[in-house]
Amino acid sequence: MKKIEEYVKNIKNAIIEAVRLDTEGIERVGVLFSSGLDSSIIAKACELIGKKTTLYCVGTVKSKDFEYATKAVAYINADLKIIELREEDIEKLSREVLKFIPKKTPMDISIALGVYASCKVADEKLMLSGQGADELFAGYYRYLRADLKGLNEILRKDFEKLINDDLVRDRLAAEHAGKILKAPYTRISEVAFNIPPEYKIFDGKRKYILRLVGKDLGLPEFIYEREKKAMQYSTGIEKIVKKLIKTGKLNALL
């Protein structure tokens, strides 16, 4: 088995090449930026290949993502745009995304809304997402319960769902805001599935090897070691969407 340092190098190079391919011929790009590890690596890759980049961080006033994004941009050569949503904004945007998303669960509404809101504000035509990293490198809490021997097979199934379901939703959201959305991690699936499971979950730490990639890229510890909640929770959007559903304000569209 290869040493972990070799896998880190291979993943880092694969991600940078994926970003290069997804942005070929384009000078300026936007990144859906949650201030977590996945989107920070994509943003750093944009910097390394010389792209002019704007990071778009969306959330409610209480979102911790804003604080981390403001700190993170000091380590990434990019502009940062904070998109703060109030309850009335979320109600309006929910009504818009419910017209085109296939699934209408609170989670799907919340994630599509975040993508849609960011893309509406963005000046760039091309937007990059960190989607796919959790499925490739075992980022979700539920993976801690999996038998390591079967982990990559579970990840493959979840990755297929991402491609056929979640990314369809996100690309629709971007398209309805007049943008194109690409997810560079989806280009490196075979590289990721060749990584031993014990390098993905190590000593109870999820996405272990991807954290080492973030460190190798020069990201600060508060990013590569951050145990971040999923976007719908960290932004505070899903909480308000559920409130709007509970009070009946969105029920006619569900």
Image: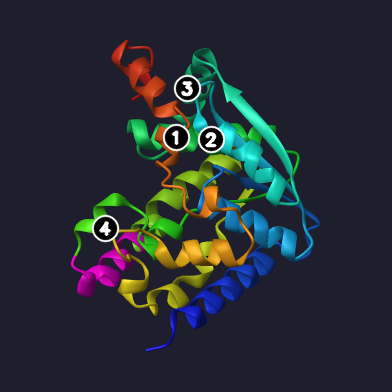
Q: Position of residue 220 (x, y in %)?
A: 60, 53
Q: Residue at x 45, y 39 (%)?
A: 231
Query: Label 1, on which residue?
Result: 234
Residue 54 appears in which quarter of the rendering?
A: top right
Spatial CA distance of label 1 from label 3 is 21 Å
Spatial CA distance of label 4 from label 2 is 24 Å
- Camera-side residue: 46 or 2? 2
Mark nearest the camera among 3 and 4 is: 4
Q: Position of residue 126 (x, y in %)?
A: 69, 50
Query: Label 2, on which residue?
Result: 65
Crowding near the residue tagged with mark 4, few <14, some 14–19, many ≥20 C-alpha atoms within 10 Å:
many
Q: Which residues are magenta?
A: 147-159
Image mark for residue 143: 4
Element at label 4: helix
Type of the residue with mark 4: Tyr
Element at label 2: helix
- Coloring scheme used: rainbow
Q: Residue at x 46, y 48 (%)?
A: 226
Type of the residue with mark 1: Ser
- Camera-side residue: 191 or 254? 191
